[in-house]
Image (cartoon, rainbow, N blue to C red):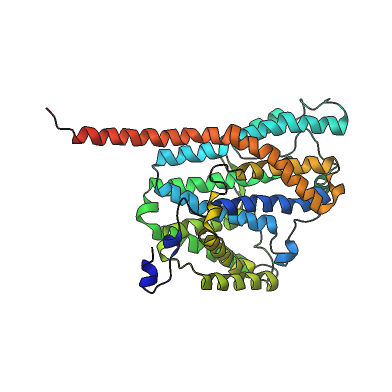
Amino acid sequence: MQAWFNEGRSPTLQDRYSARHNAFGALRLAMACGVIIAHAGPIGFGVGNLGTGLFAGQSDIGTISLYGFFLISGFLITDSALRSSLPQYIRARLLRVFPGLWVCLLVTAFVIAPLVALYENGNLDGFWGHPEGPFDYVTTNVLASMEQFPISGLLADTPYGRLGGGPSAFDGSLWTLRYDLAFYGVVALLMMTAVLRRSPRAVLLLTVVCYALVLWDFLNAPTITSRPPQHGAIGPFPLLGAFAADWTLMLGFLFLLGTAARLYAHRIPVNGVWALVAGVVLTGSMLKGGFFAVGLPAFAYLVLYAAVALPKRLSRVSRRHDYTYGLYIYGFPVQQVLALVGGAEFGMFGYIVLSLLGTLVFAVPSWHLVERPALRFKTESVRARRRVDRDAETRQTVPVS
């Protein structure tokens, strides 16, 4: 373990990374809470996402948390892909996303939405047969395309509804799932073509091309602090629908950056000096502008550094009980309901605390009753495959009589 010190070189990300002992779980949990905290502004009080001032209008707590999600996802998904066959990889990704999502859609459409209708209208007249009713909500979004966000015209008179001037989204956070699935598909394609294992330079080149496009957009933005300009939609594609070009570029860059970091972990130095430099660059870009040009790579480095440098005891966070996904998919509807019933009367801090506690009420059973049982099928599949491999090896080594 001390070989790199003896050689007089800086430890690399590969030297310090352990699949079992890392802080990725703790970071993802913090980022899920960051999304809920940021959404307290528009959902509870009809103002912008919290933390916008920290980034000079370039980002906010929720968006930077989202960037972190996709960076970590790129790293961990690639790590999983390198240790899996293609069928195992696809099975694991589907089991991680869809069971929790399907139950969330059902709970939102047939538990939360009827209660909202009763609160707003005093009855359920017109609720079930509405053109954008609960049945349409589930069937339209069952493959995570999220083409329908409102349900039966409800939530128009909430702070978030008034911002949009009409029926409001019940679960606005789910828009990112189609991007997750699309990038998972990209990794599957890289596995099918053997690029992931045999030609990592192609992945690095793709990452560099994405970064060049980010820089191009940044240099052509109206001001030095602006986000990259929008370029319309990409698609629509079968099943997944259309993708916003600017979000595809930004989230795709972060995901590919995580993928490249995993593939080139043996080349990335990880130490306090580089972390300090990255911290200075990130802070400068937040205060003076240039976040999309230099702040994003610096942020990515700090996330990866934190994952391997934070105390090992944090590796226990989310290892056995991972509530991150539940917090993410249930946070928005919980905050909408809290805003509807007057949760903002407790002030911003009180509303945030209520939002986090209320979301846990759904996230905890989501993990224990839906997500973890579904993931057992993934584990059983892997174990079965290992048993088959062991049996095959045994048959090959037993002498024929």
43 or 369: nearer the eye? 369
125 or 122: nearer the eye? 122
The x and y percentages for residue 240 are 58, 41
The x and y percentages for residue 79 are 44, 51
Q: Residue at x 76, y 25 (%)?
A: 128
Q: Which residue is drawn at 69% across and 41% down?
A: 360
Compared with 290, 383 (above or below) is: above
**Whether residue 59 can be seen here:** yes
317 or 91: nearer the eye? 317
Query: Which residue occupies the extreme front position in the image?
Result: 313
Q: Which residue is drawn at 52% across and 60% down?
A: 304
- The C terminus appears in which quarter of the rendering? top left
The x and y percentages for residue 315 are 53, 52
The x and y percentages for residue 342 are 86, 43
Compared with 1, 335 (above or below) is: above
**Left or right, residue 385 beside residue 214:** left
- The N terminus appears in which quarter of the rendering? bottom left
Task: Give the quadrant of residue 384.
Answer: top left
Q: Residue at x 34, y 54 (%)?
A: 198
| Total marks in image | 0
**Whether residue 169 can be seen here:** no
Task: Give the quadrant of residue 17.
Answer: bottom left
